[in-house]
Image (cartoon, rainbow, N blue to C red):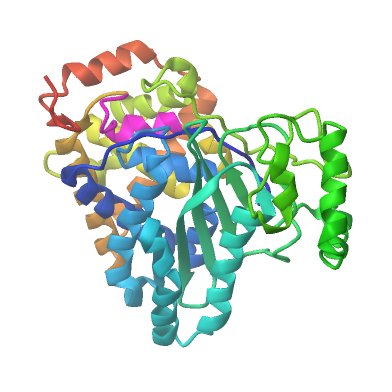
Amino acid sequence: MKNTGFADLPLHGGTVPKWLAERMMQMGTLIVESLVYNFGRKEVLVRLSDPLWFQSFGAVMGMDWHSSGITTSVMYALKRGLNPRAKDLGICICGGRGKYSRRTPEELEIACNIAGLDGSELIRTSKLCAKVDNTAVHDGFQLYQHNFILTASGDWAVVQQGMNVQKKSARRYHWCSQNLRSFVETPHTAVTGENIGQILNLTDKNADRTRCSILELARENPDRIVREFKNIQHHNLVLPGSAFSGNEVENIADDSRSFSLPASQSLFPEFENKIESRSIVMPRHHEVRSEDVDTKRLGAVLATAYESEPKDFESLLLTPGLGPRTLQSLTLVSEVIYGTPSRFKDPARFSFAHGGKDGHPFPVPLKIYDESIRILHESIEKSKLGYKEKSDCIRRLHSTAVQIERNCAPQADFDAAIAWEKQHSKEWGGRVQGGCCS
């Protein structure tokens, strides 16, 4: 996957409450553990490098389905859950948000010493990823989070995020060592964030001539560069509102700030930023609406949970206390583990597993969430001992939903589904940030 899309991630304030953070850590770790045992460590990196899967992953864990906070909360949950088990699973996470991002080199060095890897090269890799997204790509977003995911075999992925305060938006960048050929020629697996028109992307494969020109300019006398920028300003190529105007051009040789042009103009017409098929724009409204969800797929999930023959999932149904509502959550968890890339184009649908801390689409049903964690944990532990009935059932939840979707084409009654959840919210221990549901 390369240059696979963008998403508008509205900036949200606040923190993740402890009651949700602990469950996110457990659920996220179990899903990653299942991926490792079913598909291997590299698959974990590929999944984390897919912006749509990442957003769905956060939604199934009960985070706000569309906000920029998913990035911080998911990576923090994984770091807390995976690092104590790094020796067992062969995956560790370095870095974080703000001051913790600056600790990435130190943490990487420790991890590499333990695993016997070349720490200096991986530290260089980490710095290059951050440098490219913060400097070589001038898209208006300033990095404030950097996470480096490392496996025992030396494969890696990076998830980092930038902020545009004026637009109240964030952009998430994904990197992966798999199939990565060059740091300066289309290296991204994906860029997610607000589409603000054309951007200055010096990593584009078509920007080779521009990069060479920049190197030539770097060898020129600074006085000549100042004169050229004055000419550009004189011809109105730098418009009001850009980073340079008026007398600021006089000090351009000493000014490190970047600037951008309107979408209708480009200093480098030989290339443009191209957005390919895996694109998503996360809306700014807080509530989940029917247009945010593939109701046919949601209908298949509900049919799997509430209408499937008991014999299909006998091993799960014999679990004390398990009912259709927990099967609904496990069906969506199963899709996160076993689903193909095409299944994650509507991340909001995955919030129907465990709701959202902001109450959208409904409060987090803690009793259901705990049952999902318990059953998933039990299925993984029994699989290690050779008893795979429960894990096979969880796998079949996804395949059954896909078959129902293809053959029966049920359309979910979106409003009725949410009303049903809210009606039973108190019974299921529904909770939102700041308190319980009414």
121 displayed left or right of 85: right
413 vs 286: above or below: above
Q: Is residue 351 magenta?
A: yes
152 displayed left or right of 26: right
**Res. 329 in view:** yes
> Foreground: 396 or 99?
99
37 displayed left or right of 197: left
174 vs 13: above or below: below
The range drawn in magenta is: 347-360
Q: Position of residue 169 (x, y in %)?
A: 49, 34
Q: Residue at x 47, y 64 (%)?
A: 148
Q: How many marks?
A: 0
Q: Position of residue 225 (x, y in %)?
A: 84, 55
**Res. 411 in view:** no
Q: Position of residue 124 (x, y in %)?
A: 58, 74
> Foreground: 147 or 360?
147
323 displayed left or right of 120: left
Q: Position of residue 40 (x, y in %)?
A: 48, 66
Q: Is residue 352 magenta?
A: yes
180 vs 317: above or below: below
